[in-house]
Image (cartoon, grey):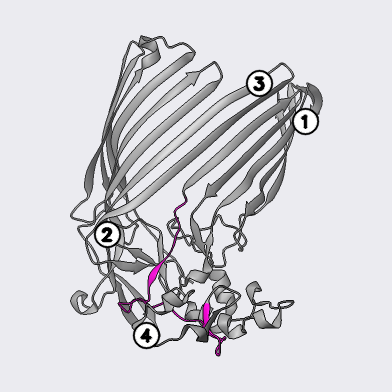
Amino acid sequence: MNSQDQLERNINYLASQTLDIRDTYIIDGMWRRDGSSLFGSNNRFKNFYRISGAWRVSEDIRIPGVQELKLRAGRGTAGLRPQFADQYETYSTGGGSISKNQVGNKNLQPAVATENEFGFNATFLNRFNLELVQANRITRGAFLAVPLSLAQSGGFTNQVQNAADISARTTELSLQTEVFSRPDVSYSFTLTGDHTKQVIDHLGRAPFRVGGLGQGQDMFYYKQGEPLGIMYGQQWVRTFAELKQNPANASAVESDYSVNRLGYLIRTASPGALIKLVDANGNDQFVIGNVNPKFNWGLANNLRFKSFSVYALLDGQHGGQIYNFTKQWMTQDWRQGDMDMAGVPQAEKVPATVFTGSLYNGLVASDYFVEDGSYVKIRELSIAYELGGQVMRIAGLDRIASKVKLALIGRNLKTWTNYSGFDPDVTAGGDFNFRVDGFRYPNFRTLTGQVELTF
């Protein structure tokens, strides 16, 4: 058992002002000073600001078919607070002894995110609403638990530091329209999409590996100049040309090798083991995947027919890869579906040792378990029926409800994907940069009934 008691103190000062000129030119400004006990003792306060402006073009210039056109831009800063224990020394106990974990940091500051945003809103043809936004953000002093040399740190293993600058570029699009509207029937939808790219611009130390598998086999790098979410691991040789990259295989004869059912090169006389890829420089670690999707999207639909209404929300992701750690773990226990060779011709069967030995690989990450994470999901579907006024007896008195609405709501009803695990909508722990499926439960499918009374 364990318990904890945390006391935090925050002091905030805020001033803001908005200027509206003829409902056409809008300027907004804000200044904020934040103080927090979560910051290191040498940096208890930090200033933040926001300045933005908008021009309602359609108020100055009449554009045929356009009811509203607004251009806007803004720049602002925001602070990310460290966790409670990040500034302190921490220790662990076990077996009657005390071990050093984290060394304290009195200079720990909030990570400051500065964002420049540009966009426009347009309403046109009395039917469409379009919004396009480009947001460029840089976070300076992002928190990293930096590994330390035990000799230099006096036995501590890491320290939380403001060690990285990370930039991000996000493009967002939203289109809303009422397709048709009649007294008895109407239909409208909202389409959204976004794309984000994040890069580590500066790292105040040498590259180092970070979590993902949770078994001491970290597969992600924090590396200057590289996007967040790049997977590293081992690859297995697929062609004879790849085999020859390794100087140790200079005398290999191509006729001694063949490609097995899984697409990997094997020594024909020893089919029970795969061959690890090693390049000419002796490197056996390579980029094996990228968690970042090409884009995310959503489609919300509203359909009404007389007293019935239907709402359906679909969303999805195109691109981005997942590491199927669950699948890798199960190879050691003979429980992974790919191991089933029933019905496979004898000449094509893959020996079990390929899975339990090579692919299991002591849980070291490898390319075999990297899968496409694209999906389409029915995130929500609701069907409702609205009744007219109804007489209801409440507390012994008759009351007339002006409206009675009955609804059935389902969430996470269906997923279309080529991913072999339970659910591609997965991350490892609380970090969305680590799309690792390590025995994660899928999103629950729920069905809910609803009765809404309006008096």
Dot 2: within a 10 Å radius of its alpha carbon, few (fewer than 14), some, or many (20 or more) residues?
some
Say what secondary structure mark 1 lies in.
loop
First to last magenta residue range:
265-293
Is 292 part of what is drawn in magenta?
yes
- Numbered tag placed on residue 346 in the rendering: none
Is the residue 417 above or below the residue 350 in the image? above
Q: Upstream in the sequence, badge 4 or badge 2? A: 2
Evaluate if marks 3 and 2 touch, with contact meaning CB atoms under 8 Å apart: no
* Callouts 1 and 3 close, C-beta under 8 Å: no
- Read off the residue under disc 1: 395
> Which x, y percent locates residue 272?
57, 86
Q: Nearer the viewer, mark 1 or mark 3?
A: 3
Task: Identify the residue at horizontal 33%, vertical 34% (top origin).
Answer: 117
Q: Which residue is mark 4?
A: 250
Q: Say whether disc 3 or disc 2 marks the residue closer to the N-terminus.
A: 3
Residue 335 is situated, as x and y percent measured from the top left of the image, at 65, 77
Q: Nearer the N terminus, badge 1 or badge 3?
A: 3
Q: Secondary structure at mark 4?
A: loop
**What residue is rendered at 43% in x and 79% in y?**
243
Whether 221 is drawn above or below 264: the answer is above
Which residue is nearer to you in this view: 195 or 402? 195
407 left or right, relative to 367: right
Q: Which residue is mark 2?
A: 224
- Name the amino acid type tagged 2: Gln
Taking the spot 61% from the left edge, 63% from the top edge, the residue there is 420
User: Which is in the foreground here, disc 1 or disc 2?
Assistant: 2
- Magenta stretch mostly in which secondary structure? loop
